[in-house]
Amino acid sequence: MTDYLDFFGDLAISQLATDLDHSTPDPFAILQDNPQAQLIYLIEAYPYDVTQVNTLTGEPPFGTLPISHYGFDYYGGVSLVCLSDVGFVTKPTDTLANKYFIGQVNNAFQFDVSVLSNDEFGNSNQSYGSIVIQNGNGNLDRLTDYFWSSRRVTVKAGAKTFRYQDFATIFDGAIDDFDGDDDQFTLTIKDNRSKTDQQIVSGIYGGTGGIDGGANIINTYKPLAYGKIKNAEPILVDSINLIYQIHDGSILGVDAVRDRGVGLTNGGDVPDIILATVAPGQFKTQLSGGYIKLGSTPAGRITMDVQGENGNGGYVSKTGAIIQRIVTTRLGLNPVEPEYIDGGSLNNLDAVLTGDVGTYINKNMTASDVISDLVSGVGAYWTFTRQGLLFAGTVSPPSVESAVITINDIDEQGIKLERVTKPAWRVSVGYAPAWTVQDESELASATTNADRSFVSNEYRYLTHEDRAVRGNSKELIEKIFYTNIANQADAQSLLDRLVSVYSTPRQVFQLTVYRALFKLYIGAQVRLIYNRFNLNAGKVFMVSGVSEDAETGATVFELWG
């Protein structure tokens, strides 16, 4: 037993002495810590098999069979294909019992991902890799009869002695293509970005009149507003009753309505906008449906300032919260399930990007488009992890490492300095966007100077200049970041962080490491110690790209810092 601890602080808070810690160790983590360990891989693919026979038992749906007939066969269904690099049989007591994984895989997993494009962070393009299956004996020819495109595939890693449930999922994604020849098949795999590459779905105007819209907007999507939106143009859905819609669903509030730039008076909220009586020069709202109604024919374009989406789960106005709300509620029949979202990363995103933001969707857009628009200008990035989770992070100067890479870990070819980014002497942040920009011809003479200035410029700007950086470089680099941030103070916080990132030359190294498969991913910070490039004492970098190859055991890191 552990002796009584003599001093407060002998162990960290929440840390248990070894003999008191009864938590279950992670078999895969233990395996990764063993430099002599030999990983094996289990591949589970889920293609569609049109020849599969299925039997429906019990009472069939009404009208499908004659009365008194029970049960029938039907064709077509998802088939589970189990493959391995060495062959593996699960035990009767395993969670997937008595399953044989055919040992004909040559390269079980090769995958590449990066969130750094040139010198900018943002969204990673869809990441691709491959699984190579040996078929010289023809035993797997049946696989050519399946439908593979966009079907799910998982790759698990572990040891020959593991139970099935002890294997760790190191990839959860989809199949992009299936091809082959007499000797082998290749499954081209992709990350789960196809989940967010879907078009955002809202209600559709039927064109029957009233709040269902007229013939001029029939079959068009209703607009969507999230967070704080300024000077957005709503959709005129009922020209007779002067009813407009800014969001398909409940919103938190309408802060302003302008006609040719002149503010109208808020007459209050009503439960039914159609029945509302509105005085001239006023508007009323039905917040539950995202509507406003005017009291008199407008002189020109109507624009609004709103606090948007306030549906199930309440009002959302932070970047991560808006992303999660959209991908879970606005992708129709195929939303991103909560288990495929790294909620912790989105919470961390909101902990850094503390201010309110907004986005207005009044045209066909994919969820990927909207996420990129929210993330790309704020020193952040997003991607899908190997395990298939939607993941986001922010960029700051690397400072605290979670791992160390030394010359002893690096391939004998050494490291490659890919480039040194050029420092920016001037960094600007555009914030508080006007979603509809109006020129002088669209504004009434009664428009206030403040409103006139706001609506005639797409962004407000904050700028930082460093004359020392300008004096050190003949190439005058300027960077402008366009954001959806609503408030100046939050834009200033972002500017301070972006200056720390971009006003200093940054090195980008590429290096190959062995015995590091599946240990580090995008956003991890590592200390690189090497006998060249002034790295003898070590320097902390951020992992901006990873390429992993199960066949060779090599991990190629792209490090930024």
Image: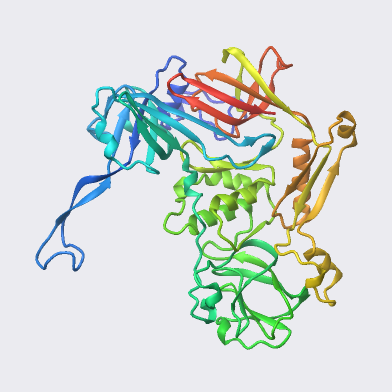
Q: Position of residue 106 (x, y in %)?
A: 36, 22
Query: How many numbered marks does the figure carry?
Result: 0
Q: Is residue 218 above or below residue 12?
A: below
60 vs 145, nearest the viewer? 145
Locate residue 383: give its quadrant: top right
Instruction: Tell me the residue at 40%/22% (across/down).
Output: 39
Q: Position of residue 3 (x, y in %)?
A: 51, 23
For residue 426, side relative to residue 133 (left or right) = right
The x, y position of residue 255, in whole percent, is: 70, 71
Q: How is the image coloured?
A: rainbow
Quadrant for the C terminus in the image = top right
Name the side, left or right, on which 81 lies relative to 557.
left
**348 and 103: which is toward the camera:** 103
Look at the image and tell me whether residue 401 can be seen.
Answer: no
What is the quadrant of the N terminus in the image? top left
Image quadrant in which you'd find residue 64:
bottom left
Q: Residue at 68% of width from left, 48% of height from top?
A: 353
Nearest to the observer: residue 11 or residue 338: 338
Which residue in the rendered view is the most extreme toward the front?
A: 181
Residue 213: x percent and y percent?
54, 77
Q: Is 125 placed above or below 531 here?
A: below
Whether residue 513 is visible, yes or no, is: yes
Q: Is residue 468 toward the left or the right of residue 325 in the image?
A: right
